[in-house]
Amino acid sequence: MASLITCPHCGTRPKEEFSIRGDATVVRPSPKASDEDWYAYVFVRDNPRGMVKEYWHHVGGCRRFLAVERDNVTHEVFAVTDAAAVAKEAAR
Ligand SMILES: [Zn+2]
């Protein structure tokens, strides 16, 4: 069975239309943060097995950035939201 992602704008599409853009759980440090905090933000990532939240870019569709929650072992997708909505919620 093909891996499918349901874009909130375009509907259900094959994963080949999307590009993974990285961990969506990383929080950008303040401009005055230490060099160590910036180093960790830019270069250090966990490599979890199981549930992950990642940014995906719908390159072959609406070109919006999405936040995708999925299991990286089974490739089951649990939630897809527009990344702009996630950013607005985080800014509150
Ligand atoms: Zn789309």
Image: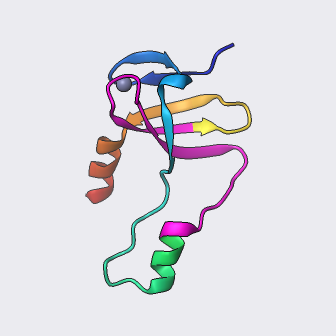
Q: Which quarter of the figure has residue 80?
A: top left
Rendering coords of residue 22 (x, y %): 51, 49
Please state the quadrant of the image where ligand 1 appears.
top left
Can you say which quadrant of the picture contains the C terminus? bottom left
Asked which quadrant contains residue 46, the reply is bottom right
Is 47 inside the magenta-drawn segment? yes
Number of numbered labels in the structure image: 0
Q: Position of residue 71 (x, y in %)?
A: 66, 37
Q: Is residue 10 above or below residue 54?
A: above
Give left or right: position of 49 versus 40: right
- In the rendered view, does 78 fall on the left or right side of 85? right
Identify the residue shown where x is 39% and y is 35%: 81
Rendered image quadrant of residue 38 = bottom left
Of residues 42 and 48, which is closer to you in this image?
Answer: 42
The residue located at (46%, 22%) in the rendering is: 6
**Image quadrant containing the N terminus:** top right
Residue 60 left/right relative to 79? left
Residue found 31% across the figure and 51% down from its top? 87
What segment is highlighted magenta in the picture?
A: 42-69
Which residue occupies the foreground of this view, 45 or 27?
A: 45
* Residue 16 on the magenta span: no
Residue 37's spot in the image, x, y percent?
48, 79
Query: What colour scheme was applied to this rendering of the protein?
Result: rainbow
Q: Residue 11's spot in the image, x, y percent?
A: 40, 16
Q: For this rendering, which residue is in front, 49 or 43?
A: 43
**Residue visible at 32% across and 23% down in the picture:** 9
